Image (cartoon, rainbow, N blue to C red):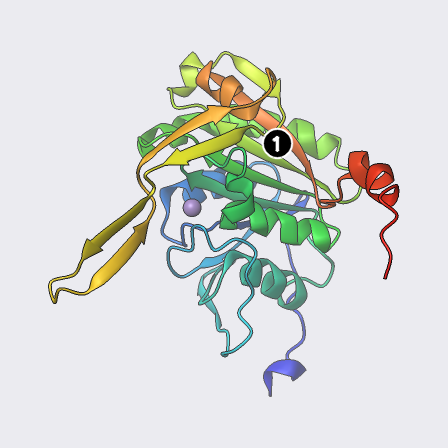
Amino acid sequence: MTPSDTPPRMRGGAGPKILCTNDDGIYASGLEVLARVAGELGSVTLVAPDRQQSASSHSLTLHRPLRLTETAPESYVVDGTPTDCVLLAVSQLYTEAPDLVLSGVNHGPNMGEDVLYSGTVAAAMEATILGIPAVAISYAGDDEARVAGYDAILRRLLRDLLEHRDFPPETFFNINLPDRPAAEVEGVRVTSLGRRIYRDSLTRSRDPRGREYFWIGGGESRWRGRDDSDFRAVQAGYVSLTPLHLDLTDFRLIEEVRSWSLEL
Ligand code: MN
């Protein structure tokens, strides 16, 4: 039987069908927490990259074969990007599309323009493009062990979001958990994207053979943004929930740009 002859697998289990993925790879502890939380809300299938894919953004693997490998019941790895994972999972593993796609829990924040680089957010975006409600979840700290304590908070939040899952088309949610123990969280704030200003985030150095190289990342970043920005909520100890939209058109500028009477 060739792969194209393989019938789609039938999904069992109760409740909504939830696809979980991430960009930190199948072994990331945040994915384990996410799968556990999702398992209490519905029947879960895990499809995640086989390695670290952070900052892979919305990239697709177009120029080499992709492998989808079952590693445990309802658990698969893909040797590609988070977007590849969602695309393969939805088209190959489900007879009907899943009811929800969850991406995360990412190790590190995805706030402000991070969402443009993030593989975590891109996976949720890909689901949205496919017409499936989706939520990206990130933890804005370094102490990964704290993420496990967020079980109850995530369960409650995701359950609430699932009840409103006829949210408008082309819309998905971006959640950031604050860098503090779950017991000390102040609440939930609905936020807008802030702006991040990086300084010294590009390092130039020499390798052991004396050749110049560059390293992107590190340095300092500072934030600015509206009072309701995601980073302000997270800094104040709140869970940040940002509704995001796929359409990047600047509708505020459309009329003005038309008035420029551009001609060819
Ligand atoms: Mn990541």
Instruction: Give the camera-side residue of 154 and 225.
Output: 225
Q: Is mark 1 on a helix, strand or loop?
A: helix
Q: Residues within 10 Å of mark 1 (few under 14, many from 20)?
A: some
Residue in view at x 60 percent, y 62 percent: 89
Residue 6 found in image quarter: bottom right
Check the image and report above or below for 203 versus 236.
below
Residue in view at x 68 percent, y 31 percent: 161
Give residue 2's position: percent from left, percent from top.
60, 87
Residue 189 falls left or right of residue 238: right
Residue carrying label 1: 158
Instruction: Give the camera-side residue of 18 and 131.
Output: 131
**Total numbered circles:** 1
- Quadrant where the N terminus is found in the figure: bottom right
Check the image and report above or below for 90 versus 108.
below
Residue 102 falls left or right of residue 97: left
Give residue 178's position: percent from left, percent from top.
44, 23
Residue 168 visible (yes or no): no
Check the image and report above or below for 223 versus 203.
above
